[in-house]
Image (cartoon, helix red, strand yellow):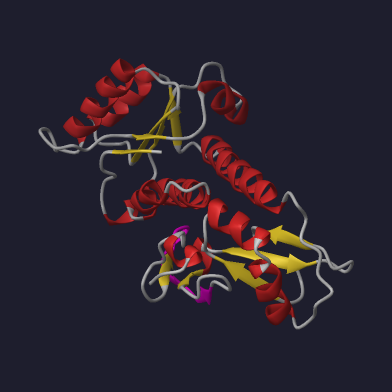
């Protein structure tokens, strides 16, 4: 019978996985210290040990020294902390018992993943790969230019439906359930992240940029327990994103 960590493990990709920012490049796997599952390094979260013994999230996996990897969602992480399982696993990984786990570690990870996803959207906007505004997105979608369609959490169903239909027209997928993805950020958050007024919908037009955005959103959604949506986002490079709400 699967334990709690295995049930809440973020679904890994079998074998090595492609680097979402560099098509064709393989990313090495890492093993989750809680569930034992293997996954691409980009799908897991690295924890680093600070000089004072504090355990800190290293979301970019660039901190020096020994690291430990987790691939479970927030609920499983909180349970592992409460039961002392995380401390035991970290002690084995870091080969020391002098470890302090901050009470807000899960919150730090969630906020960091959220910030990374929103920052990625901002970077792609500045790079010219993002459309905002319903009319511009609809036009681009009908022309087949929109690779990834995102809707704010508080977007209207009618607005979503119109853009979803434009996406299907552009992808020659009328009659299918192809649609954009409702993300866990409302229009206020998206507007602040992109520095524009009333951002309700987002269209990413460059395939590589769409893959990077989907990867960042997928990590965030996987950690907050939206595993089905995380998988749909991570698989976007294999084709279009299906009907998914996160």
Residue 182 in view: yes
Q: Is residue 67 above or below residue 103?
A: below
Q: Residue at x 31, y 19 (%)?
A: 157
**41 or 69, which lies in front?**
69
Q: Residue at x 26, y 34 (%)?
A: 179
**Coordinates of residue 191 in the picture (x, y in percent):** 57, 23
Q: Residue at x 71, y 69 (%)?
A: 87
**188 or 52, which lies in front?**
52
Dividing the image into 4 quarters, which one contains the N terminus?
Answer: bottom left
Determine which quarter of the picture holds residue 134: top left
Q: Is residue 81 left or right of residue 2?
A: right
Q: Is residue 136 above or below residue 94?
A: above
**Coordinates of residue 50 in the picture (x, y in percent):** 83, 66
Magenta region includes residue 186 = no
Q: Residue at x 45, y 34 (%)?
A: 130
**Coordinates of residue 56 in the picture (x, y in percent):** 75, 60
Q: Is residue 179 left or right of residue 128?
A: left
Residue at the farthest left position: 175
Q: Which residues are magenta?
A: 19-31
The number of numbered badges drawn on the structure is: 0
Q: Is residue 194 above or below residue 111?
A: above
**Coordinates of residue 120 in the picture (x, y in percent):** 56, 44
Dividing the image into 4 quarters, which one contains the C terminus?
Answer: top left
Main SS of residues in magenta: strand
**115 or 87, which lies in front?**
87
**72 or 64, which lies in front?**
72
Determine which quarter of the picture holds residue 61: bottom right
Residue at the farthest right position: 52
Residue 62 in view: no
């Amino acid at each position: 019978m699967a334990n709690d960590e295995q049930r809440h493990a973020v679904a890994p990709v079998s074998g090595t996985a492609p680097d979402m920012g560099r098509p064709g490049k393989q990313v090495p796997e890492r093993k989750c210290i809680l569930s034992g599952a293997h996954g691409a390094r980009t799908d897991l979260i690295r924890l680093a040990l600070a000089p004072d013994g504090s355990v800190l999230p290293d979301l970019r996996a660039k901190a020096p020294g020994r690291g430990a990897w987790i691939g479970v969602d927030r609920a499983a992480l909180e349970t592992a902390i409460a039961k002392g399982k995380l401390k035991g696993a970290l002690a084995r990984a870091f080969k020391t018992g002098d470890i302090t786990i901050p009470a807000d570690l899960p919150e730090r990870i969630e906020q960091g993943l959220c910030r990374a996803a929103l920052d990625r959207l901002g970077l792609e906007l500045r790079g010219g790969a993002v459309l905002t505004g319903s009319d511009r997105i609809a036009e681009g979608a009908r022309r087949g230019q929109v690779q990834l369609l995102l809707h704010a959490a508080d977007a209207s169903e009618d607005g979503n439906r119109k853009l979803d239909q434009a996406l299907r027209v552009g992808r020659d997928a009328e009659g299918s359930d192809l649609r954009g993805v409702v993300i866990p950020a409302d229009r206020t958050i998206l507007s602040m992240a992109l520095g524009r007024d009333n951002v309700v919908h987002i269209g990413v037009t460059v395939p590589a940029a769409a893959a990077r955005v989907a990867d960042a959103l997928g990590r965030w959604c996987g950690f907050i327990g939206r595993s089905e949506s995380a998988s749909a986002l991570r698989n976007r490079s294999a084709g279009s994103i299906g009907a998914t709400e996160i």
